[in-house]
Amino acid sequence: MKSRSTISGFTLIELIMVIVILSILSLYASSRFMRTGISAVAIQDQVISVVRQVQVNRMQSNVSSAVGNNDFILSIATNCIGSKASCSSQSSSRSDWVEDSSVTFSPVREVQFDLLGNPTPPSVTISISENNSSQTCTVTINEQGYVSKDGCS
């Protein structure tokens, strides 16, 4: 009687499939590592965080008017977004500003919040444009102060 021996290993088709899957994964990963700068989508999340931080700081301030205090005024410049005080000083010890040379913020303006978090002017849309591509993301502050992430194009 012949005994059957079991052969363990991969078939040729299994080996080819593993190589194809690994090559697809490596192409995807390498395209992510070859990017220069930071994407507008990542900056969009940082902008939302900074806008909310300036808004909450104003709501917790309990001063009747934010006109004289630059910590409670949101400044939107072409290269910086954050409290007016932090964008002018650009100190690394402050966390209420975002600055990146690979993106441009628009429109250039100042936004003030009242004690309820409502912005003046009402309904502000902030555009974040990548300088080296056509990608643009937007962040909206509505009339009631809700900060939302809009789409990217």
Image (cartoon, rainbow, N blue to C red):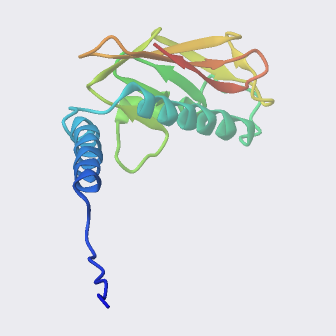
**Picture quarter with the N terminus:** bottom left
Which of the two residues, 3 or 153, is positioned nearer the viewer here? Answer: 3
Q: Is residue 73 above or below residue 34?
A: above
**Picture quarter with the C terminus:** top left
Q: Residue at the location (68% across, 39% down)?
A: 56
Q: Residue at the location (31% across, 30% down)?
A: 100
Residue 7: give x, y in percent of width and height: 26, 77
Please indicate whether residue 33 sits to the left or right of residue 112 in the image: left
Residue 118: give x, y in percent of width and height: 75, 22
Q: Residue at the location (23% across, 49% down)?
A: 16
Which of the two residues, 32 or 45, is positioned nearer the viewer here? Answer: 32
How many numbered badges does the structure rendering display? Answer: 0
Q: Residue at the location (69% across, 11% down)?
A: 123
Please indicate whether residue 119 sits to the left or right of residue 24 in the image: right
Residue 34 position by quadrant: top left
Q: Is residue 140 above or below residue 43?
A: above
* Residue ranking furthest to the bottom: 1
Residue 143: give x, y in percent of width and height: 76, 15
